[in-house]
Image (spheres, rainbow, N blue to C red):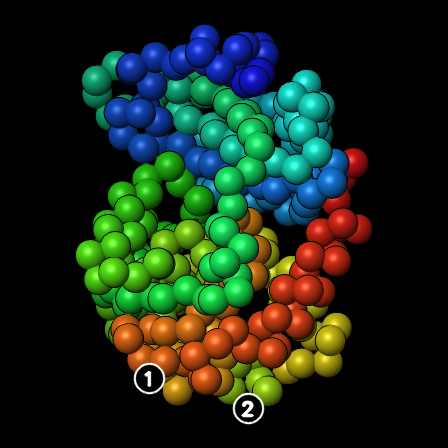
Amino acid sequence: QLIYVNGQFVEKKKAVISIYDHGFLYGDGVFEGIRVYEGNVYKLKEHINRLYESAHSIMLNIPHSKEELQQIIVETVCKNELNSAYIRVVVSRGTGDLGLDPRNCPEPTVIVIAEALSIYSDNLYKKGLKLASVVNRRSSPDVLNPQIKSLNYLNNILVKLASVQADADEALILNNQGYVTEGSADNIFIVKNGKIKTPPVYLGALEGITRNALIDIAKEQGFSVEETPFTLHDVYIADEVFLTGTAAEVIPVVTVDNRQIGDGHPGEITRRLLHEFRKQTLIDGVP
Ligand code: PLP
């Protein structure tokens, strides 16, 4: 496996960065996860744009043009001869000293990893997930805005841990006002009386690229989709619940905090949207 590290392709075992890298020391950096379907990099432009926006927000200058980085990503996939893959792009502040000051990190670290996929098992798509809700006081935009896809994922890891302790498959994060925001690495949708709802990102969610793709697909399929705040109660009484994400695609949820959702099986609309989503992944990519 060849990994892109700062301008070179190196074998996995030799792909190393400095222990003084501020990505490692402080989570100071940004990243993207991207899928390759049948040789097409899905929504590459959207992922690149979000990466540059996250970097801009934390005043990190990515040392490549968007076109160059796009080329590096495609090259990484080609060099590894992957037809279906998961790509991780990481840009950190780079190597500095033990102080926090980013001015002592002259060169950002750029890494691109493309590897064969380990996705959720087919069984989970058929059976659906169990969620546990977790209040995450840091999900408000005045602390570290979840709209920035930064390397600082400790909050997400803590909510994931809480969900594991609650014996659930994934966490459902509430903001400090009690509004539902997102999962630890995915966005949430609910369906009630045929209408689809997802929280607005300003409540404290990443603007998921799969989320946006799904909103478009659902509208094309004639559904009404509203970006509107809702509470846990709305989730408990929904007919269907599902999560979206680069890794998760569109995955049904069948219980939340031990309350059964709908009839306890993946919903019809969810299954239809997953089907349409998978069809689209084969068309809407960069070859
Ligand atoms: N929310 C969080 C916190 C995430 O880390 C991710 C994954 O990237 C998502 C949502 C889903 O976003 P996307 O569909 O762009 O993968």
Residue kind at label 2, given as amino acid type? Asn
Instruction: Please indicate whether residue 59 sits to the left or right of residue 68 in the image.
Output: left
The C terminus, quarter of image: top right
Most foreground residue, 222 or 53? 222
Label 2: few (<14), some or many (≥20) within 10 Å? Answer: few
Question: How many numbered marks are there?
Answer: 2
- What's the residue at 24%, 51% (across, down)? 161
Residue kind at label 1, given as amino acid type? His
Eyeballing the image, is 286 above or below 11? below
The residue carrying mark 1 is 233
Instruction: Please indicate whether residue 243 sits to the left or right of residue 142 in the image.
Output: right
Eyeballing the image, is 241 above or below 148? below
Rendered location of residue 238, percent (x, y): 44, 84
- What's the residue at 61%, 77% (across, down)? 269
Most foreground residue, 58 or 259? 259
- What's the residue at 52%, 61% (across, down)? 125
Instruction: Please indicate whether residue 141 sits to the left or right of residue 217 in the image.
Output: left
Rendered location of residue 215, percent (x, y): 63, 68
CA gap, disc 2 to disc 1? 15 Å
The N terminus, quarter of image: top right
Say what secondary structure mark 1 lies in.
helix
Instruction: Compare marks 2 and 1 and give the one earlier in the sequence.
Output: 2
The residue carrying mark 2 is 193
| Residue 77, quarter of picture | top right
Q: Are marks 2 and 1 in contact (CB under 8 Å)?
A: no
